[in-house]
Protein backbone atom coordinates (compact mmCIF):
# COMPACT_ATOMS: atom_id res chain seq x y z
CA UNK A 1 0.00 0.00 0.00
CA UNK A 2 1.30 3.45 -0.93
CA UNK A 3 1.91 5.62 2.10
CA UNK A 4 -0.97 8.08 2.61
CA UNK A 5 -0.53 11.83 2.34
CA UNK A 6 -0.23 13.85 5.55
CA UNK A 7 -2.70 16.72 5.89
CA UNK A 8 -3.56 19.26 8.56
CA UNK A 9 -6.81 20.31 10.25
CA UNK A 10 -7.05 23.64 12.09
CA UNK A 11 -8.21 23.32 15.71
CA UNK A 12 -8.15 26.75 17.33
CA UNK A 13 -4.57 27.99 17.01
CA UNK A 14 -3.14 24.51 16.46
CA UNK A 15 -2.68 22.51 13.28
CA UNK A 16 -3.40 18.81 13.83
CA UNK A 17 -1.68 16.37 11.46
CA UNK A 18 -3.70 13.45 10.12
CA UNK A 19 -3.78 10.74 7.47
CA UNK A 20 -6.62 8.77 5.85
CA UNK A 21 -6.15 5.42 4.10
CA UNK A 22 -8.21 2.38 3.12
CA UNK A 23 -11.48 2.18 1.22
CA UNK A 24 -13.68 0.12 3.51
CA UNK A 25 -17.29 1.05 4.18
CA UNK A 26 -16.59 1.70 7.87
CA UNK A 27 -14.81 4.82 9.06
CA UNK A 28 -12.35 3.80 11.78
CA UNK A 29 -10.54 6.34 13.97
CA UNK A 30 -7.36 4.73 15.33
CA UNK A 31 -6.13 6.63 18.39
CA UNK A 32 -2.52 6.51 19.53
CA UNK A 33 -1.75 5.50 23.06
CA UNK A 34 -0.18 8.73 24.24
CA UNK A 35 1.96 10.80 21.88
CA UNK A 36 2.82 9.72 18.37
CA UNK A 37 4.53 10.38 15.06
CA UNK A 38 2.47 8.45 12.56
CA UNK A 39 4.81 8.96 9.60
CA UNK A 40 7.57 7.13 11.46
CA UNK A 41 5.09 4.51 12.70
CA UNK A 42 4.79 3.27 9.11
CA UNK A 43 8.50 2.39 9.19
CA UNK A 44 7.92 -0.36 11.75
CA UNK A 45 6.92 -3.32 9.59
CA UNK A 46 4.54 -4.86 12.15
CA UNK A 47 2.81 -1.50 12.70
CA UNK A 48 2.50 -1.05 8.95
CA UNK A 49 0.98 -4.48 8.60
CA UNK A 50 -1.45 -3.68 11.43
CA UNK A 51 -2.56 -0.54 9.60
CA UNK A 52 -2.85 -2.37 6.28
CA UNK A 53 -5.05 -5.05 7.81
CA UNK A 54 -7.37 -2.39 9.29
CA UNK A 55 -7.49 -0.77 5.86
CA UNK A 56 -8.78 -4.01 4.32
CA UNK A 57 -12.20 -3.47 5.90
CA UNK A 58 -12.31 0.23 6.83
CA UNK A 59 -11.34 3.77 5.94
CA UNK A 60 -8.77 4.45 8.65
CA UNK A 61 -8.17 7.90 10.16
CA UNK A 62 -5.06 8.54 12.28
CA UNK A 63 -3.73 11.77 13.79
CA UNK A 64 -0.91 13.02 16.00
CA UNK A 65 -2.13 14.65 19.24
CA UNK A 66 -1.12 18.27 19.68
CA UNK A 67 2.24 18.56 21.34
CA UNK A 68 3.74 15.53 19.59
CA UNK A 69 4.88 14.28 16.23
CA UNK A 70 3.73 16.39 13.29
CA UNK A 71 1.07 18.39 15.14
CA UNK A 72 1.62 21.82 16.68
CA UNK A 73 3.03 22.23 20.16
CA UNK A 74 1.75 25.54 21.49
CA UNK A 75 3.16 24.97 24.96
CA UNK A 76 -0.24 24.50 26.60
CA UNK A 77 -0.97 21.92 29.28
CA UNK A 78 -2.40 18.61 28.17
CA UNK A 79 -6.10 17.99 28.73
CA UNK A 80 -8.34 15.19 27.55
CA UNK A 81 -10.98 17.77 26.65
CA UNK A 82 -8.60 19.51 24.24
CA UNK A 83 -7.64 16.20 22.63
CA UNK A 84 -11.34 15.46 22.08
CA UNK A 85 -11.87 18.85 20.40
CA UNK A 86 -8.87 18.26 18.14
CA UNK A 87 -10.11 14.83 17.09
CA UNK A 88 -13.58 16.14 16.28
CA UNK A 89 -11.95 18.80 14.10
CA UNK A 90 -10.10 16.06 12.18
CA UNK A 91 -13.30 14.04 11.74
CA UNK A 92 -15.03 17.12 10.35
CA UNK A 93 -12.11 17.78 8.00
CA UNK A 94 -12.30 14.27 6.50
CA UNK A 95 -16.10 14.30 6.28
CA UNK A 96 -16.72 11.51 8.77
CA UNK A 97 -20.15 11.89 10.34
CA UNK A 98 -20.12 8.55 12.12
CA UNK A 99 -17.02 6.59 13.05
CA UNK A 100 -15.89 3.51 14.95
CA UNK A 101 -13.00 4.09 17.35
CA UNK A 102 -10.03 1.81 18.02
CA UNK A 103 -7.95 3.07 20.95
CA UNK A 104 -5.02 1.59 22.84
CA UNK A 105 -3.43 2.50 26.18
CA UNK A 106 -4.14 6.12 27.17
CA UNK A 107 -5.98 6.60 23.89
CA UNK A 108 -8.75 4.56 25.50
CA UNK A 109 -9.64 7.40 27.86
CA UNK A 110 -10.02 9.70 24.86
CA UNK A 111 -12.16 7.08 23.11
CA UNK A 112 -14.42 6.86 26.16
CA UNK A 113 -14.82 10.65 26.27
CA UNK A 114 -15.71 10.78 22.59
CA UNK A 115 -18.27 7.98 22.95
CA UNK A 116 -19.85 9.53 26.06
CA UNK A 117 -20.01 13.11 24.80
CA UNK A 118 -20.64 12.53 21.08
CA UNK A 119 -22.87 9.44 20.91
CA UNK A 120 -24.31 10.58 17.58
CA UNK A 121 -20.83 10.42 16.00
CA UNK A 122 -19.36 7.27 17.60
CA UNK A 123 -20.74 4.05 16.11
CA UNK A 124 -18.59 1.58 18.08
CA UNK A 125 -15.73 1.57 20.56
CA UNK A 126 -12.83 -0.90 20.65
CA UNK A 127 -10.34 -0.60 23.51
CA UNK A 128 -7.00 -2.36 23.93
CA UNK A 129 -5.14 -2.32 27.28
CA UNK A 130 -6.80 0.96 28.26
CA UNK A 131 -7.01 2.45 31.78
CA UNK A 132 -10.02 4.35 33.08
CA UNK A 133 -7.74 6.12 35.55
CA UNK A 134 -3.95 6.55 35.55
CA UNK A 135 -3.26 7.16 39.26
CA UNK A 136 -3.79 5.14 42.41
CA UNK A 137 -7.02 5.51 44.36
CA UNK A 138 -8.46 3.43 47.23
CA UNK A 139 -11.00 1.90 44.86
CA UNK A 140 -8.50 1.71 41.97
CA UNK A 141 -5.48 0.36 43.77
CA UNK A 142 -3.68 -1.32 40.85
CA UNK A 143 -2.78 2.04 39.23
CA UNK A 144 0.53 3.81 39.90
CA UNK A 145 1.18 5.72 43.10
CA UNK A 146 2.96 9.10 42.74
CA UNK A 147 6.35 7.77 43.77
CA UNK A 148 6.01 4.80 41.41
CA UNK A 149 5.10 7.11 38.55
CA UNK A 150 8.07 9.40 39.15
CA UNK A 151 10.47 6.47 39.29
CA UNK A 152 9.07 5.03 36.06
CA UNK A 153 9.25 8.41 34.31
CA UNK A 154 12.84 9.01 35.31
CA UNK A 155 13.88 5.50 34.30
CA UNK A 156 12.29 5.93 30.88
CA UNK A 157 13.62 9.45 30.31
CA UNK A 158 17.18 8.40 31.18
CA UNK A 159 17.32 6.22 28.08
CA UNK A 160 14.94 8.33 25.95
CA UNK A 161 15.81 8.08 22.28
CA UNK A 162 18.65 5.64 22.83
CA UNK A 163 18.76 2.21 21.24
CA UNK A 164 18.46 -0.06 24.24
CA UNK A 165 16.31 -3.05 25.02
CA UNK A 166 15.15 -2.14 28.54
CA UNK A 167 11.99 -0.34 27.43
CA UNK A 168 11.43 -2.81 24.62
CA UNK A 169 11.61 -5.68 27.09
CA UNK A 170 8.76 -4.11 29.08
CA UNK A 171 6.56 -3.18 26.16
CA UNK A 172 7.28 -6.14 23.87
CA UNK A 173 8.94 -9.05 25.69
CA UNK A 174 8.53 -11.37 22.72
CA UNK A 175 10.64 -9.00 20.58
CA UNK A 176 13.11 -7.84 23.25
CA UNK A 177 16.09 -9.15 21.28
CA UNK A 178 15.01 -7.63 17.97
CA UNK A 179 17.58 -4.94 16.99
CA UNK A 180 15.40 -3.55 14.19
CA UNK A 181 12.48 -2.92 16.53
CA UNK A 182 14.76 -1.47 19.23
CA UNK A 183 16.24 0.93 16.69
CA UNK A 184 12.78 1.92 15.45
CA UNK A 185 11.55 2.55 19.01
CA UNK A 186 14.55 4.76 19.81
CA UNK A 187 13.99 6.92 16.74
CA UNK A 188 10.26 6.98 17.41
CA UNK A 189 10.92 8.46 20.83
CA UNK A 190 13.20 11.13 19.37
CA UNK A 191 10.55 12.08 16.85
CA UNK A 192 7.72 12.08 19.41
CA UNK A 193 9.08 14.75 21.70
CA UNK A 194 12.26 15.95 23.38
CA UNK A 195 12.92 14.31 26.79
CA UNK A 196 11.80 17.38 28.77
CA UNK A 197 8.55 17.65 26.85
CA UNK A 198 7.96 13.92 27.19
CA UNK A 199 8.45 14.15 30.97
CA UNK A 200 5.95 17.03 31.25
CA UNK A 201 3.39 15.20 29.12
CA UNK A 202 3.83 12.06 31.19
CA UNK A 203 3.28 13.98 34.41
CA UNK A 204 0.20 15.69 32.99
CA UNK A 205 -1.45 12.34 32.21
CA UNK A 206 -1.47 11.55 35.95
CA UNK A 207 -4.79 13.37 36.24
CA UNK A 208 -6.61 11.30 33.59
CA UNK A 209 -9.79 9.77 35.05
CA UNK A 210 -12.84 8.89 32.94
CA UNK A 211 -14.60 6.60 35.41
CA UNK A 212 -17.65 8.83 35.69
CA UNK A 213 -18.07 8.74 31.90
CA UNK A 214 -18.15 4.95 31.58
CA UNK A 215 -21.88 4.49 32.33
CA UNK A 216 -22.68 7.09 29.65
CA UNK A 217 -21.09 5.06 26.85
CA UNK A 218 -23.88 3.65 24.70
CA UNK A 219 -21.88 2.57 21.67
CA UNK A 220 -21.25 -1.19 21.28
CA UNK A 221 -17.93 -1.77 23.02
CA UNK A 222 -15.22 -4.42 22.67
CA UNK A 223 -12.39 -4.52 25.21
CA UNK A 224 -9.19 -6.61 24.84
CA UNK A 225 -6.13 -7.13 27.00
CA UNK A 226 -3.27 -9.63 26.98
CA UNK A 227 -3.13 -11.63 30.18
CA UNK A 228 0.64 -11.28 30.69
CA UNK A 229 0.92 -7.53 29.93
CA UNK A 230 3.79 -6.10 32.02
CA UNK A 231 2.96 -2.42 31.39
CA UNK A 232 -0.80 -2.14 31.88
CA UNK A 233 -2.40 -4.31 34.52
CA UNK A 234 -5.27 -6.32 32.96
CA UNK A 235 -7.48 -5.07 35.81
CA UNK A 236 -7.69 -1.76 33.92
CA UNK A 237 -9.58 -3.47 31.11
CA UNK A 238 -11.62 -5.59 33.50
CA UNK A 239 -12.78 -2.40 35.22
CA UNK A 240 -13.71 -0.85 31.88
CA UNK A 241 -15.71 -3.93 30.95
CA UNK A 242 -17.56 -3.94 34.27
CA UNK A 243 -18.59 -0.28 34.06
CA UNK A 244 -19.35 0.26 30.35
CA UNK A 245 -22.91 -1.01 29.71
CA UNK A 246 -22.99 -4.30 27.78
CA UNK A 247 -19.28 -4.17 26.98
CA UNK A 248 -17.71 -7.38 25.69
CA UNK A 249 -14.37 -8.31 27.28
CA UNK A 250 -11.97 -10.65 25.49
CA UNK A 251 -8.78 -11.58 27.40
CA UNK A 252 -5.97 -12.42 24.98
CA UNK A 253 -2.93 -14.64 25.36
CA UNK A 254 0.52 -13.07 25.34
CA UNK A 255 2.80 -10.72 27.25
CA UNK A 256 3.27 -7.82 24.83
CA UNK A 257 1.72 -4.46 25.66
CA UNK A 258 2.26 -3.29 22.07
CA UNK A 259 -0.70 -4.46 20.02
CA UNK A 260 1.17 -4.90 16.73
CA UNK A 261 3.83 -7.17 18.27
CA UNK A 262 3.23 -10.84 19.01
CA UNK A 263 0.01 -12.45 17.81
CA UNK A 264 -1.47 -9.28 16.38
CA UNK A 265 -3.72 -11.29 14.08
CA UNK A 266 -5.75 -12.41 17.09
CA UNK A 267 -6.44 -8.76 17.96
CA UNK A 268 -7.17 -7.82 14.36
CA UNK A 269 -9.54 -10.77 13.94
CA UNK A 270 -11.53 -9.63 16.96
CA UNK A 271 -11.70 -6.04 15.69
CA UNK A 272 -12.79 -7.08 12.22
CA UNK A 273 -15.46 -9.47 13.44
CA UNK A 274 -16.80 -6.95 15.98
CA UNK A 275 -17.09 -4.16 13.40
CA UNK A 276 -18.11 -6.13 10.30
CA UNK A 277 -19.58 -9.39 11.58
CA UNK A 278 -17.01 -11.34 9.54
CA UNK A 279 -13.75 -12.93 10.68
CA UNK A 280 -11.61 -13.57 7.64
CA UNK A 281 -8.57 -14.51 9.70
CA UNK A 282 -6.24 -12.30 7.67
CA UNK A 283 -6.82 -14.35 4.55
CA UNK A 284 -5.42 -11.47 2.51
CA UNK A 285 -2.11 -11.70 4.37
CA UNK A 286 -0.15 -13.32 1.52
CA UNK A 287 2.20 -11.70 -0.95
CA UNK A 288 4.42 -12.59 -3.88
CA UNK A 289 7.95 -11.86 -2.67
CA UNK A 290 11.55 -12.67 -3.46
CA UNK A 291 13.07 -14.27 -0.37
CA UNK A 292 16.79 -14.02 0.38
CA UNK A 293 18.81 -15.99 2.91
CA UNK A 294 22.43 -15.12 3.71
CA UNK A 295 24.92 -17.05 5.82
CA UNK A 296 28.60 -16.56 6.71
CA UNK A 297 30.78 -19.45 5.50
CA UNK A 298 32.67 -21.33 8.27
CA UNK A 299 31.52 -18.90 10.93
CA UNK A 300 32.25 -21.30 13.80
CA UNK A 301 35.85 -21.76 12.67
CA UNK A 302 36.36 -18.02 12.14
CA UNK A 303 34.95 -17.23 15.57
CA UNK A 304 37.35 -19.73 17.14
CA UNK A 305 40.33 -18.27 15.26
CA UNK A 306 39.53 -14.64 16.05
CA UNK A 307 38.29 -14.97 19.62
CA UNK A 308 35.05 -13.60 21.03
CA UNK A 309 35.98 -9.91 21.00
CA UNK A 310 37.38 -9.69 17.44
CA UNK A 311 34.65 -11.96 16.10
CA UNK A 312 32.01 -9.77 17.74
CA UNK A 313 33.50 -6.68 16.08
CA UNK A 314 33.61 -8.42 12.70
CA UNK A 315 30.04 -9.64 13.05
CA UNK A 316 28.86 -6.11 13.93
CA UNK A 317 30.60 -4.74 10.81
CA UNK A 318 29.03 -7.50 8.73
CA UNK A 319 25.55 -6.71 10.03
CA UNK A 320 26.07 -3.00 9.32
CA UNK A 321 27.09 -3.45 5.69
CA UNK A 322 24.35 -6.02 5.03
CA UNK A 323 21.69 -3.67 6.41
CA UNK A 324 23.13 -0.82 4.35
CA UNK A 325 22.78 -2.79 1.11
CA UNK A 326 19.32 -4.09 2.05
CA UNK A 327 18.15 -0.49 2.46
CA UNK A 328 19.93 0.60 -0.73
CA UNK A 329 18.11 -1.97 -2.86
CA UNK A 330 14.69 -1.64 -1.22
CA UNK A 331 14.67 -4.91 0.67
CA UNK A 332 13.16 -5.48 4.09
CA UNK A 333 14.95 -7.25 6.89
CA UNK A 334 12.63 -9.87 8.34
CA UNK A 335 15.00 -11.17 10.99
CA UNK A 336 18.54 -12.31 11.73
CA UNK A 337 19.38 -15.93 12.45
CA UNK A 338 22.77 -16.34 14.07
CA UNK A 339 25.14 -14.77 11.54
CA UNK A 340 22.65 -14.75 8.66
CA UNK A 341 19.75 -12.62 7.43
CA UNK A 342 16.28 -13.34 6.10
CA UNK A 343 15.25 -10.55 3.70
CA UNK A 344 12.28 -10.00 1.39
CA UNK A 345 11.86 -7.91 -1.76
CA UNK A 346 8.70 -6.75 -3.51
CA UNK A 347 8.42 -6.90 -7.29
CA UNK A 348 10.72 -8.69 -9.76
CA UNK A 349 13.87 -10.33 -8.33
CA UNK A 350 16.32 -7.98 -10.08
CA UNK A 351 16.79 -5.81 -7.01
CA UNK A 352 17.31 -8.89 -4.84
CA UNK A 353 20.01 -10.19 -7.20
CA UNK A 354 21.82 -6.85 -7.23
CA UNK A 355 21.53 -6.66 -3.46
CA UNK A 356 23.01 -10.15 -3.18
CA UNK A 357 25.94 -9.12 -5.34
CA UNK A 358 26.53 -5.97 -3.29
CA UNK A 359 26.36 -7.91 -0.01
CA UNK A 360 28.81 -10.54 -1.28
CA UNK A 361 31.27 -7.82 -2.33
CA UNK A 362 30.94 -5.89 0.93
CA UNK A 363 31.46 -9.07 2.95
CA UNK A 364 34.53 -9.98 0.90
CA UNK A 365 36.05 -6.59 1.71
CA UNK A 366 35.60 -7.43 5.39
CA UNK A 367 37.41 -10.72 4.90
CA UNK A 368 34.40 -13.06 5.08
CA UNK A 369 32.54 -15.08 2.48
CA UNK A 370 28.80 -15.58 2.32
CA UNK A 371 26.37 -18.05 0.88
CA UNK A 372 23.23 -16.43 -0.55
CA UNK A 373 20.04 -18.16 -1.68
CA UNK A 374 17.06 -16.65 -3.54
CA UNK A 375 13.58 -17.85 -4.45
CA UNK A 376 10.50 -15.98 -5.66
CA UNK A 377 7.11 -17.25 -4.52
CA UNK A 378 3.96 -16.55 -2.54
CA UNK A 379 4.64 -16.09 1.17
CA UNK A 380 2.39 -16.18 4.19
CA UNK A 381 2.58 -12.96 6.20
CA UNK A 382 2.37 -13.95 9.83
CA UNK A 383 2.96 -12.62 13.35
CA UNK A 384 5.90 -13.12 15.68
CA UNK A 385 8.72 -10.62 15.11
CA UNK A 386 9.81 -7.72 12.94
CA UNK A 387 9.75 -8.41 9.23
CA UNK A 388 9.15 -7.24 5.71
CA UNK A 389 5.73 -5.92 4.86
CA UNK A 390 4.54 -8.20 7.61
CA UNK A 391 5.83 -9.15 11.01
CA UNK A 392 7.26 -12.42 9.72
CA UNK A 393 7.07 -14.55 6.59
CA UNK A 394 6.42 -18.24 6.21
CA UNK A 395 5.28 -20.87 3.76
CA UNK A 396 6.90 -23.07 1.16
CA UNK A 397 8.60 -20.16 -0.61
CA UNK A 398 10.63 -19.42 2.52
CA UNK A 399 11.62 -23.08 2.92
CA UNK A 400 12.76 -23.26 -0.71
CA UNK A 401 14.95 -20.16 -0.40
CA UNK A 402 16.49 -21.50 2.81
CA UNK A 403 17.34 -24.89 1.27
CA UNK A 404 18.77 -23.31 -1.88
CA UNK A 405 21.05 -21.10 0.22
CA UNK A 406 22.69 -24.20 1.69
CA UNK A 407 23.60 -25.35 -1.84
CA UNK A 408 25.51 -22.17 -2.68
CA UNK A 409 29.30 -22.35 -2.80
CA UNK A 410 31.30 -19.86 -0.69
CA UNK A 411 30.94 -16.41 -2.23
CA UNK A 412 28.11 -17.58 -4.48
CA UNK A 413 24.45 -16.68 -5.04
CA UNK A 414 22.26 -19.72 -5.72
CA UNK A 415 18.74 -19.21 -7.10
CA UNK A 416 15.62 -21.18 -7.96
CA UNK A 417 14.18 -21.50 -11.47
CA UNK A 418 11.53 -18.91 -10.51
CA UNK A 419 14.26 -16.32 -10.04
CA UNK A 420 16.29 -17.27 -13.10
CA UNK A 421 13.24 -17.38 -15.41
CA UNK A 422 11.91 -14.04 -14.14
CA UNK A 423 15.00 -12.17 -15.38
CA UNK A 424 15.53 -13.92 -18.71
CA UNK A 425 16.75 -11.39 -21.27
CA UNK A 426 18.17 -9.14 -18.59
CA UNK A 427 21.78 -8.51 -17.56
CA UNK A 428 22.06 -11.64 -15.41
CA UNK A 429 23.56 -14.98 -16.46
CA UNK A 430 23.36 -18.27 -14.60
CA UNK A 431 25.10 -21.63 -14.49
CA UNK A 432 22.94 -24.74 -14.16
CA UNK A 433 23.98 -26.67 -11.05
CA UNK A 434 21.71 -29.62 -11.72
CA UNK A 435 18.66 -30.93 -9.92
CA UNK A 436 18.60 -31.34 -6.16
CA UNK A 437 16.31 -32.66 -3.49
CA UNK A 438 15.43 -29.87 -1.07
CA UNK A 439 14.73 -31.22 2.40
CA UNK A 440 11.03 -30.88 3.23
CA UNK A 441 10.15 -29.72 -0.32
CA UNK A 442 8.41 -32.09 -2.77
CA UNK A 443 10.18 -33.15 -5.98
CA UNK A 444 13.61 -32.36 -7.37
CA UNK A 445 14.53 -28.74 -8.06
CA UNK A 446 16.94 -27.31 -10.65
CA UNK A 447 19.33 -24.91 -8.97
CA UNK A 448 21.24 -22.12 -10.71
CA UNK A 449 24.24 -20.04 -9.67
CA UNK A 450 24.51 -16.38 -10.64
CA UNK A 451 27.65 -15.86 -12.72
CA UNK A 452 29.86 -13.05 -11.41
CA UNK A 453 30.10 -9.99 -13.64
CA UNK A 454 33.81 -10.66 -14.23
CA UNK A 455 33.03 -14.11 -15.63
CA UNK A 456 30.38 -12.70 -17.95
CA UNK A 457 32.78 -10.03 -19.22
CA UNK A 458 35.38 -12.67 -20.03
Image: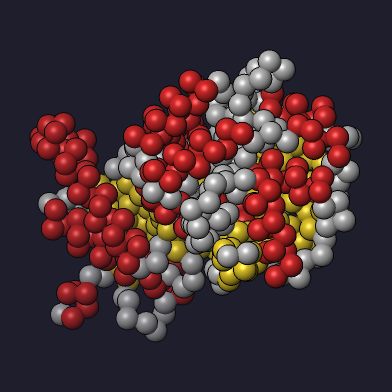
Q: Quadrant location of the N terminus? A: bottom right
Residue in view at x 51 percent, y 61 percent: 72
Q: Position of residue 399 (x, y in %)?
A: 48, 49
Residue in view at x 63 percent, y 64 percent: 12
Q: Position of residue 170 (x, y in %)?
A: 48, 30
Q: Position of residue 191 (x, y in %)?
A: 42, 54
Residue in view at x 69 percent, y 64 percent: 89
| Quarter where residue 324 is shown | bottom left
Q: Along the horizontal axis of the image, is 360 left or right of 32?
A: left
Placement of 146 over or under 358, stated as above or below:
above
| Quarter where residue 151 is shown | top left
The foreground one among 197 and 155 is: 197
The foreground one among 105 and 415 is: 105
Q: Along the horizontal axis of the image, is 73 left or right of 322?
A: right
Q: Does residue 423 appear in this view?
A: yes
- Tag count: 0
Placement of 334 over or under 89, stated as above or below:
above
Q: Quadrant location of the C terminus? A: bottom left
Q: Position of residue 185 (x, y in %)?
A: 43, 46
Residue in view at x 82 percent, y 65 percent: 97
Q: Does residue 58 appear in this view?
A: no
Q: Along the horizontal axis of the image, is 217 left or right of 76?
A: right
The foreground one among 21 and 211 is: 211
Amino acid sequence: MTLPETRYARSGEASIAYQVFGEGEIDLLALSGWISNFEHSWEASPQRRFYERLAEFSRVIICDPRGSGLSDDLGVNYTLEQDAEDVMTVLDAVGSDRVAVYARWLGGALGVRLAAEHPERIAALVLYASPARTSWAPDYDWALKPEQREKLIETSIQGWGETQNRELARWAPSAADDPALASWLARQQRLLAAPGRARIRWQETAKVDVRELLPRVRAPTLIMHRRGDQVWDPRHSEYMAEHIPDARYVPMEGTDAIDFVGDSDAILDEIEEFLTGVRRGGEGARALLTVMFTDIVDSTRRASELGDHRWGDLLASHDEVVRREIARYGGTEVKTMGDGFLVTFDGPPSAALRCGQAIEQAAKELGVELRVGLHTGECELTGGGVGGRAVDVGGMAVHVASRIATLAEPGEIAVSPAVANAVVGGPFEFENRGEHELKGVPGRWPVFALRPEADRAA
